[in-house]
Structures are given as C-alpha cells and as structure tokens.
Amino acid sequence: MRFRPTLLIAGALLAGCAVERIAPPQTELHTELFGDTGRESIRTLFVVLHGDARPANRANSYAFAQAVVKAVPKSAALAILRPGYADAMGNASPGERGAGTGDNYTSERLQKIAAAIASAKAQVPAARVILIGDNGGAAMAADLAGIRPRLIDGMVLVSCPCTLPEWRKYMKKRAPSLNWESPVPSLDPLKTAGGVRPDLRAAMLVGAKDEITPGSFSRPYAEALALRGIATDYRIVPDRGQLSLDDPEVLDATRRLVDHMPEKP
C-alpha cells in the first residue's frame, strides 16, 4: 500500500504545519491513495474499483483516481485491487481471480472490499463516500450498495452487467470458449437492489454501441432504483462502445453526482 501525494501547498510549509493525511486502510488488499488534502478537510472520499480484465486490457483505475481528486476539491481517492488481481506494476491482492465469467462478485470478496472502504471511511467521518466502478467493478459496487447500505453515499456504475444471469447467458453466445454455464456464487446486483438506501445518489453510464455490456443489462437495475425513489442519472452515451474509467464521460458524470449531493452536516 502506498500513498502518492502531490506537492504540499506552500502556505502549509511556510507555517510549519504538518498536514495529517488519510492513512492506507487496514486491509490485506493492495490499495493506492491519492490526494494531498488534509484529513480534517476531506469532504468527499472516492473509492475506485477496476474491471474484470487483466492489467493490459483494462482501464487504469489509478489514473482515474488521480484525475478525480484533481477535479473535485477537498477530496481523496482510494483505488482498490480486487481480490486475486494484479496491476501493471506487479502489485497484487491475495485471493483467486476466477475465470472472468462473472464468477467473482461473491460475498467473501465483497466483504474484503467493504472492510477496506470502512477502514478508510472511519478516518474521514465528515466525508461523503462515492464508489465508482466499471464492468465487473460496477457490478461489485452495486452489490455493495445493496448489502452494505450504510457504507457509501453515492455510486457511479459504468458498463455494468447489473442483471448478472441474463448477461452471462448473452456472453455464452459471444464467447462460447469460456465456461458460462456453470453456476456461480456471485451476487446479482438486481437482486441486491432492494437493500440500497433510499437517499443514495447513483449515476449509470453505458455506450450506445456497447456489445459487451449493452444497456439491456443495466437499465433494469436503474429502473429498480428509481422505483425505490433513489435519484438515478442513467445515461446512454452516443457513438461509444463499452465505456470504462478512462472515458472522459465518467469523470464528468462523477463531478455531476458530487455537485448534486448534499455535504454531510
């Protein structure tokens, strides 16, 4: 676990004041923290979950975390390597990655991620916690919102396979060489939607030309949230295939979400 601060502000240095920053969470998972805001001043804590692919084929969650703290004042960002995954620098979180067939959105893995978030959240009680994920990371974010409703205040779901059984049936036709038929212990976001707290704010993005996670697998989840009175900004982005964290639309959606969320008292 490493902290990657930007330069301290000159005023703090001249005054000889030590800025107490948020510490790496107590977790076995590999995490990276971004931001130079002092812990007492943090009002938004972003948590970023990467997608299912291996490092060379997925968006850089660290780059997104760094970008979002630059875009949103008084914020910090925590990027978590999901259990069994590695990053491009060789860092890894213990556990089994799985086969990449929607088989690793399990309660055990979710609880490990939840523990890391809770450890970071405890240090910044005045901060709103916003969870952001793409692809499998989005499915896990949605699941966490349902099974640990007090953990987060908002979420941004990008290209989410949020109706998991239907998506796996669809992918069986697209990638028949993989084992999509075996039952999996993953939680289906649509089935956990009933546990999402009513005052949570959500944003969902899907590319109009997405052939991997088309909107038919995220819209029912957005509708389930809306039926519960949860403010949900669901957007289909024109002329885009599968969206990921490196798409500028995701950063824009995150900023919009923050702008419409009340600060904690």
Image: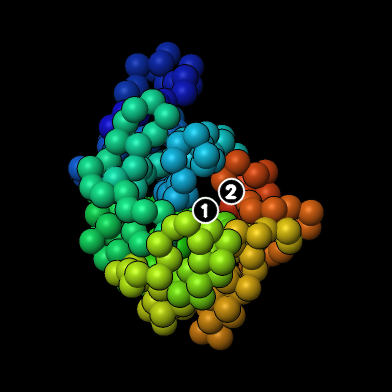
Please indicate whether residue 73 sits to the left or right of residue 122 in the image. Answer: right
Residue indicated by mark 2: 244
Residue 115 image-quadrant placement: bottom left
| Image quadrant in which the C terminus is located | bottom left
> Quick check: can you spot residue 252?
no
The percent position of residue 153, horizontal first and vertical second, equals 44, 63
Residue indicated by mark 1: 134
Q: Residue at x 67, y 43 (%)?
A: 248
Do the numbered discs 2 and 1 sit on residues whose CB atoms are within 8 Å?
yes
* Vertical placement of residue 16 versus 141, above or below: above
Direction top: furthest residue: 14
Please indicate whether residue 70 sits to the left or right of residue 100 in the image. Answer: right
* Vertical placement of residue 168 versus 117, above or below: below
As measured in the structure, the alpha-carbon distance from the residue carrying label 2 to the one carrying label 1 is 6 Å
Residue 180 image-quadrant placement: bottom left
Q: Earlier in the sequence, mark 2 or mark 1?
A: 1
| Image quadrant in which the N terminus is located | top left
Secondary structure at numbered mark 1 = strand
The percent position of residue 183, horizontal first and vertical second, equals 33, 72
Secondary structure at numbered mark 2 = loop
Q: Residue at x 73, y 52 (%)?
A: 240
- The colour mode here is rainbow
